[in-house]
Image (tube, helix red, strand yellow):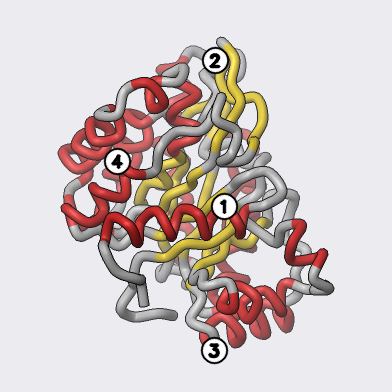
Amino acid sequence: MTKDLKIRFGPSGNDELFYAQGNKSTIQAPAWLSRMGLSAMEINFTRGTKMSVETARKIGDEARKYDIELSAHAPYYINLANDEAFEKNYNWIKQCLVLLKEMGFRRLVVHLATQGERSREDALKSVGINLIKIIEKLDSDGLSDFLLCIETMGKYSAIGNVEEICAFCKVDPRVIPTLDFGHINCLLQGELQTNPNKIGEVIEYVEREIGREKLKIVHVHWSAIVYSEKGERYHTKLSDNKWSFSFEPFARIIKEKELTPVIICESDSIMAQDAQKLKREYEKILGKEIN
């Protein structure tokens, strides 16, 4: 794994250009991303962990060869507010971390829960208890070298607004936020589009709550997302001006605070190409190319 983590830009999974250029396997992705000037990738286990250990090792070898920082996204159906499903939730997280360990990396993005029919207070209580239990069980199973990157969510019915995520990040040093700014914009009903200072306010809040050490290595998702009064509907492209918002305020914060985030672009269909756009915007702010 990369020891001196730089600012990293990359896609969420393989996009349409990857396949259009004749690639067929994620094993080929690190070399392809390197040619595109990108340095990160999030592997999607969102529908389950069907990858073999052998494939995981090959992907990890290629990632190190081309200096690509890998992370993974755990299954969507994890719900830590469901006490009865604790063992299933734990096993999904464990399976992801086992594969990440075989690759030689440690960042796992997790959607915590949905509120369901319970009160918000009761659901949050269960999530907190089950998150601690999962961490303790991972330690007892010999999987202590991980970062659980718990994600801010885009629907009001989901557990995971900025305040909730920051509160859960306090349970263990290995729990950090995934700040999904597209999701945050959905819950704020477009305020990141209309208020250029709002991203700075979010970052200041996160730093106050969880400290600079975790903020510095924060995991980030960036995309334009179509939303309604209920929150997130679906992802679109950065070129969709009706739903996109400027990356510049966050780029300036990265430079000013000397952050080293992993920034994953989740645009519809063209994640890698839009990740290049984000990197170019940051380079303009930095005033030089990123090595």
Q: Amino acid at mark 2?
A: Arg
Which disc, if any, is residue 65? 3
Helix, strand or loop for disc 2: loop
Image quarter where the N terminus lies is bottom left
Q: CA distance from mark 3 to mark 2?
A: 48 Å
Q: CA distance from mark 1 to mark 2?
A: 38 Å
Q: Which residue is mark 4?
A: 249
Residue 119 in picture, x, y percent from top left: 48, 13
Within-10-Å neighbours for mark 4: few <14, some 14–19, many 20+: some
- Disc 4 is placed on an element classified as helix
Q: Measure how far apart labels 3 and 4 are at the Cα level.
A: 33 Å
Of circles 3 and 1, the one toward us is: 1
Residue in front for this viewpoint, 253 or 153: 253
Mark 2 Cα shell of 10 Å, populated few (<14), some (14-19), many (≥20)? few
Type of residue at label 1? Asp
Which residue was labeled with disc 1? Answer: 274
Of marks 1 and 2, which one's residue comes earlier in the chain?
A: 2
Q: Mark 3 or mark 4: which is in front?
A: 4
Residue 248: numbered disc: none
**How many numbered marks does the figure carry?**
4
Callouts 4 and 1 close, C-beta under 8 Å = no
Label 2 belongs to which residue? 118
Q: In front here: 110 or 271?
A: 271
Q: Earlier in the sequence, mark 3 or mark 4?
A: 3
Whole-percent x, y for residue 180 in the image: 46, 40
Tell me where residue 80 appears, x and y as whole percent. Answer: 54, 37
The amino acid type of the residue labelled 3 equals Lys
- Report the side of 162 relative to 56 (left or right): left
